[in-house]
Image (tube, rainbow, N blue to C red):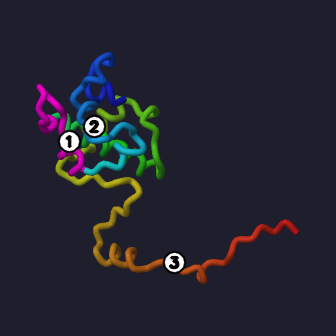
Amino acid sequence: MFVNACAAPHAHVKRHLITLALKHNGIVHFLTAFIHMTAADINSLQCVKGGNLVPLDLNFKMILRAILAFFHHESHKKHGGVSILDSTVRQFKNFRNTECDPTKEIVPWGSALSKNEGLSNWNKLVKPSARDFKPFCEANN
């Protein structure tokens, strides 16, 4: 999916500027690193080009933002993580062309979507108490 979304020939994917920028910044695995990136992380990506460290081209940053937003969107729809291998380029392109708004922030799927400040503060302050929950015991007797 990544290869097709970036329009990189499969044989050259390891030398593609996106791949080089991700590697240079320590992003080598999708689930353990890429999915946890923020828009600021993507905007700060750099790669070595002509022997110099330069910022990643804007069009590549936009592709990475769209890929990240796509997987968070799909995970939110399915109420859980999705596999990069199960997603198709067609799904990604449809999302990018119809639902993706590059001006909006990328909201991780596990985050609350509410912008209500009172609710947000309440969620931060209220912690469940162990006394409020009955202990779980299996009845094997």
Residue drawn at 28 percent across, 74 percent down: 117
* Residue beneath disc 3: 128
Query: Residue 111's quadrant in the figure?
Result: bottom left
Query: Residue 135's quadrant in the figure?
Result: bottom right
Residue drawn at 35 percent across, 49 percent down: 36
Looking at the rendered structure, the secondary structure element under dot 2 is helix
* First in residue order: circle 2 vs circle 1: 2
Q: Is residue 43 left or right of residue 10?
A: left
Residue 19, x across and y down, in percent: 28, 31
Is 45 contained in the magenta span?
A: yes
Residue 25, x across and y down, in percent: 26, 41
Is 42 contained in the magenta span?
A: yes
- Quarter occupied by the N terminus: top left
Say if mark 3 contacts mark 2, CB within 8 Å.
no
Q: Is residue 124 left or right of residue 22?
A: right
Which callout, 1 or 3, points to the residue nearer the camera?
1
Which amino acid, mark 1?
Leu
As drawn, the label of residue 22 is 2
Q: Which residues are magenta?
A: 39-58
Looking at the rendered structure, the secondary structure element under dot 1 is loop
- Quarter occupied by the C terminus: bottom right
Query: Residue 96's quadrant in the figure?
Result: top left
* Residue beneath disc 1: 45
Which amino acid, mark 2?
Leu
Which amino acid, mark 3?
Pro
Residue drawn at 30 percent across, 45 percent down: 69
Q: Is residue 87 left or right of residue 59?
A: right
**Label 1 vs label 3: CA separation?**
39 Å
